[in-house]
Amino acid sequence: MSHYKSGYEFYLKISEQFDLEPINFYYYVNQLSQEQLEYYNEAAQMKGSY
């Protein structure tokens, strides 16, 4: 979940740079595609196997 938080923080910075109203964290995570979630899970499993 910490990777989602760091991605969200980056999103907030970019939104601020372009003077855009950011969505909250719940909607940010909810908008991730199934493919993005699968990549995250694969990376987390590979990291845990070292």
Image (tube, helix red, strand yellow):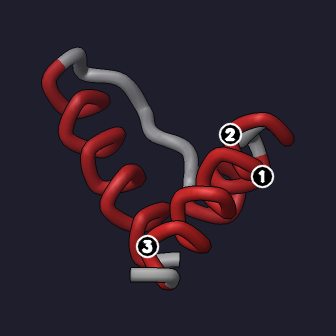
Q: Quadrant of the C terminus?
A: bottom left
Residue of label 2: 36
Q: Crowdedness of circle 2 by 10 Å Cα count: few (<14), some, many (20+)?
A: few
* Residue 47 marker: 3
Residue of label 1: 30
Q: In front here: 12 or 20?
A: 12
Which label lies toward us, 2 or 1?
A: 2
Give coordinates of residue 3: x percent, y percent. Answer: 41, 65
Give coordinates of residue 37: x percent, y percent. Answer: 72, 51
Give coordinates of residue 38: x percent, y percent. Answer: 76, 49
- For mark 3, give the secondary structure: helix
State which tag comes first along the sequence, 2 or 1: 1
Q: In front here: 8 or 20?
A: 8
The three-letter code of the residue at mark 3 reads: Lys
Q: Crowdedness of circle 3 by 10 Å Cα count: few (<14), some, many (20+)?
A: few
Q: Is residue 49 left or right of residue 38?
A: left
